Image (cartoon, rainbow, N blue to C red):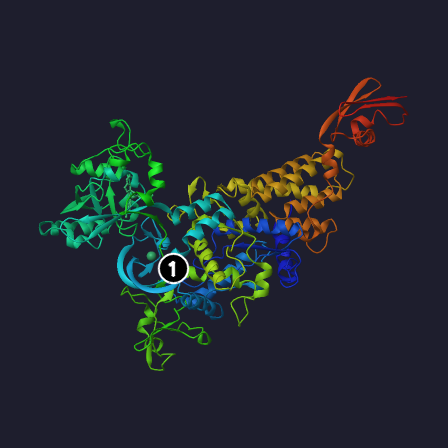
Amino acid sequence: MYDFKSIEKKWQNYYEKERPYEVNLREAKKPFYNLMMFPYPSASGLHIGNMYSFIGSDVYGRYMRLKGYDVFEPIGFDAFGIHSENYALKVGKHPAELTPKSIEYFREEQLKKIGNIFDWRSEVNTSDPEYYRWTQWIFLKLYEAGLAEKRESTVNWCPSCKTVLADEQVIEGKCERCSTEITKRQMSQWFFKITKYADRLLENLDKLDWTEITKNIQRSWIGRSKGATIAFKVEGKDEYIEVFTTRPDTVYGVTYLVLAPEHKMTGSLIKADQESLFDDFLKTVNKMDEATRTSIKREKNGIFTGSFAIHPLTGERIPIWIGDYVLAEYGTGAVMAVPAHDERDYVFAKKYGLEVKQVIECSPEELPYTEYGVMINSGPYTGWKSEDFIEKVGEVHEKIRPTVNYHLHDWCVSRQRYWGPPIPIIYCDKCGIVPVPEEDLPVLLPETNDYIPDGSGLSPLARNAEFVNTTCPKCGNPAKRETDVSDNFLDSAWYFLRYVSPRDDKQPYDPELSKKWLPVDMYIGGNEHANLHLMYSRFITMALHDLGLLHFEEPFSSFRGHGLIIKDGQKMSKSKGNIVNPNDYFETHGVDALRTYLMFMGSFLEGGDFRDSGMDAIKRFLNRVWEIANLPEAKSPLELKIKMGETVEKVQYSIENIKYNTAIAAIMEFVNEALKYGSIERQLVIDLAKLLAPFAPFISEEIFELKGGKGGVLNAGFPAGYEKYLKLANIEIPVQINGKIRGKVLVSQGATQDEVLDVLKEDSKISRYLEGKEMKKVIYVPDKIMNIIVS
Ligand code: ANZ
Ligand code: ZN
């Protein structure tokens, strides 16, 4: 049994003092930037999910270090913003007081203990003025480039967090932070024009080495949809209703139009006798989120406006309806309904007795028939194929215009909160919107006890006269500061740039170092950030690139999204009382066992089920490793070297493909094999320590040292020299001695007679028959059989 407590303590201290894996950022020869998602100091400690992510990322970093790369693995704290602030509010503490304490605990009691090869010199804290000064600087750069704009819009409002949120922060209609149902408000807010980058954000995905699932989440969020805009004239008025459709080939099947209740024309179209009905309708609709409204399953509701439109191709009268399944923010906020070929229109039409007109060939039982097909009842286009019509849609009719639509909206970045970087803008009666001059940055967040959000739609900073009142940098007259702070996700959209030069007070990042280290080589983290942090970071990087401030436009060359942990088959939650606290296991099983178990319990990319029995089994496995390390030293048989050779290959392949569990399984197999012998060669033990080092750093360091290694196991290079045994492992050659088969040897195809002889002499079973004898004759049939006559 190995004494994990004292061993782990010893090596934790060694890492802290000797820092064996620190790299010189300027001089490194083989830079490899290994990034993980820095945590929010927003809870009483890092939870097991954070650890899972950090360890899985560190396994990769350690492996690359073993492979001889200068691995830069920084860490920091996403300490500004609503995450930390909500936690502080919950426990009734000032965020400025609580956050540094949380950071201290995360760093000293957790992150420094888990054995990651963190470079603590690069630690960043987004709430530090030396950091957020540059967050504000980035805001100004975007503003100068016309990518930041203040505008009035319908925005998401969290009644509990008392702030607006970006679309990405509304998950199934609820606040990403506190799970409160969001409502809509009409407010003037700062937006970043991420939609200008929609195409590039989409197209670049094909070039990125990212987990497919993450790319697909982004693809559907960007939601590029090709179709057409068609204008329908309102009967008796000189006004048009525009609709967006992906199926212009069904235009002859339109039997009514549907407007979103929030559509700007509803007021003028609705007939007086329908007005009170409409008001009630609007109230119920406002309570529903997007997903519910458009769900195919839900019953659809609507009201007839009493007005009609004219079909642009047939001249028919088309009733105009208002329906809850049409969204104001998508397309034009109005649809042409084709009940014969669209499911939602079909149920709506059936419910309200509206006409169903078939225009794509199919049998009537198949309605609603939503596939492409041959167009029927479609005037001059009858007989056309849907695809052809869609393809040529720009040419068919002047009232049908080809259009591309995106689901992605501009990023709303204002927050009516205290704990964030004040948006560096000044409002002057004379000069209008005036950006704070760069040399006046940072706009410091004032220290105040008046920081609780009040829900008024203004930040608590608006109550701080000393902060608000300033002078206009342009004309010197009295002026007022913007009082909103920027979104937390802006802080984290550029932190990976800051890591290379975190104390630079002249610029956000050192250009020389950023050239050398960026873009990030490997980023590992949770997929829940696919549309949030990962999308925003890509956008900010592209924008900075376009401004000539970065040499690359994609921040993360490789990204791997990992799975989630469940406990005993169930989702972990406070209410279920099944939360796993990592620090408990540091005491009972050790960090090495926890790390190894987390990586072993399932495929890292898919997640796994945490069971205490599994922890026990891993502890026993590490004890067996320890046993091997303490076996007497002696030459090991060829089989075991071949086994090691195979293990080296499996571990390499598995880690590179983030199949950590199969890497560990291969090491276990080797350990079981090795324990069959009463002794082992020193080199095999050293190589075992190396293979285990990405997963179980401390026991590996100890074994490496025990066998005479110095300066850290990861600095000793990946195990090598097994190719010759592996080559030998390719085919089996039976060995006949004096006419009797005495065994088989493994050789590579095409091995020469001498090579086969060398191998069979190392085989303990066969070599018995040769000992003390003279070889009279050797006949080798290549790749088939070896005949030896001895006397
Ligand atoms: C007529 C039609 C006929 C449609 C048909 C579909 C099938 P995606 O792919 O998501 O872009 N639509 C347009 N704007 C909408 C809105 N604001 N709220 C709800 N639905 C809206 O979907 C585009 C299709 O969704 C459009 O094509 C429109 O219905 C509907 F056989 O137009 B279609
Ligand atoms: Zn909230």
Would residue 120 be seen by someone viewing this image from the given angle?
Answer: no
- The residue where tag 1 is placed is 193
Instruction: Inspect the image, locate mark 1, and give the three-letter code of the amino acid beneath it.
Output: Lys
356 displayed left or right of 642: left
* Labels in figure, total: 1
In the image, is residue 493 above or below residue 215? below
Q: Residue 541: percent from the left, percent from the top?
A: 48, 59
The one of 399 and 318 positioned closer to us in this rendering: 399
The one of 13 and 645 positioned closer to us in this rendering: 645
Residue in view at x 43 percent, y 64 percent: 80
- Looking at the rendering, which quadrant does residue 480 occupy? bottom left
Q: Which quadrant does ligand 2 occupy?
A: bottom left
The one of 787 and 181 positioned closer to us in this rendering: 787
Q: Helix or strand or loop: what does disc 1 sit on?
A: loop
Q: Residue 38: percent from the left, percent from the top?
A: 49, 57
424 displayed left or right of 548: left
